[in-house]
Amino acid sequence: MRWENLTVESGGNLPRDAALFGADAVTTRTFDTPEFRGITFHEIRAKSIVNRVPGASRMPFEWTVNPYRGCTHACVYCFARKTHSYLDLDTGLGFDSQIVVKVNAPELLRRHLGSRRWLGDHIAMGTNVDCYQRAEGRYQLMPGIIAALRDHANPFSILTKGTLILRDLDLLKQAASVTEVGISVSVGFTDHELWRTVEPGTPAPERRLDAVRTLSEHGIDCGVLMAPVIPFLGDDPSQLRATVRAIAASGATSVTPLVLHLRPGAREWFMSWLAHHHPYLVRRYERLYAEGAYAPKWYQRRITRQVHELAEEYGIGPTRAGMPRRIPAPAEPALPEPTQLTLL
């Protein structure tokens, strides 16, 4: 494994090419429990935790925090698989089972937020790998991260497939009383057969929607990122209708569809899975994604239009650019209101 390849992505307090940690700072562990069998954890003490998103990215935010690398959710389409190649780790099974854990993430973030150089910009989490994946149940990094953001009244958002987010419900409510907090849960489909094969390490779709319902019942608005919509496997009109209907019933404030995209690293692993499970679709995918990582605009527009029409029918709407999701702040907030920024 080439730890020296794991460098500052940019925007931290270190030089761009500085190593995030030394190889001698890595502790490798395995745990003989059913939920972690076959998984190796590489515990590191990172030097930087807040990363700037590259300018060419399509992401609507500038800063991210990722306490983990690799993900036990094992989604066959995960675009973050390529990042494992930077460590000479396998982007297939290695991505699912070799998990890098930044054990000092909470203290690093607290120090960063307290720096005079930090301007209080929005921080997005769960945008690379899921911060509420199975490993979080053991390492419990998110409570310290959320507490640091709360204490500095720093706006943030979380995107997750993990129901473990409910463990931190009280902290999220406290944070939302002093700053903008955006929560999105990812549910691309409700088809159980599809879920078991493409997202084998995630909670079932209905459990994720139960989490949306619980968050809503406690006053935390929660949107659903309907992602990915998988061509020819999850895009039938009846499937889209069933998914949007279930999302609406959960109390989600919005539904935003996103068609499957296949970046290098993810593309190879997904196409291998497709050849094994649905070989008759391989040629159709090669044609649909012939121009690159994204499906053609006409296909994306068709799916978006169908989902938005269904959302309107069931009484929910799409997320609009710049529309924050938030809990109403108390009449006398404990800390000054920060500048409102675009959330997920």
Image (cartoon, grey):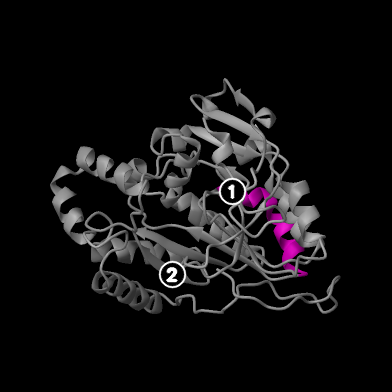
* Residue extending furthest toward the top: 32
Residue 274: image location, x then y, percent: 24, 44
Task: Kindly state the secondary structure of the residue where label 1 is placed.
Answer: loop
Residue name at image x 31 percent, y 77 percent: 305
Residue name at image x 53 percent, y 33 percent: 2
**Amino acid type, label 2:** Thr
Residue 56: image location, x then y, percent: 47, 67
Q: Where 171 sits versus 28, above or below? A: below
| Nearer mark to the viewer, of 1 and 2 | 1
Q: Where 238 sits versus 26, above or below? A: below
Report the front residue among 67 and 202: 67
Q: Earlier in the sequence, mark 1 or mark 2?
A: 1
* Residue hosting label 1: 131
Image quarter in which the C terminus is found: bottom right
Answer few, some or many: residues within 10 Å of disc 2's Cα (few below 14, many 20 plus, some between 14 and 19).
many
**Amino acid type, label 1:** Cys
Residue name at image x 78 percent, y 67 percent: 153
Residue 88: image location, x then y, percent: 46, 35
* Magenta stretch secondary structure, dominant: helix
* Residue hosting label 2: 256
Residue name at image x 35 percent, y 45 percent: 198
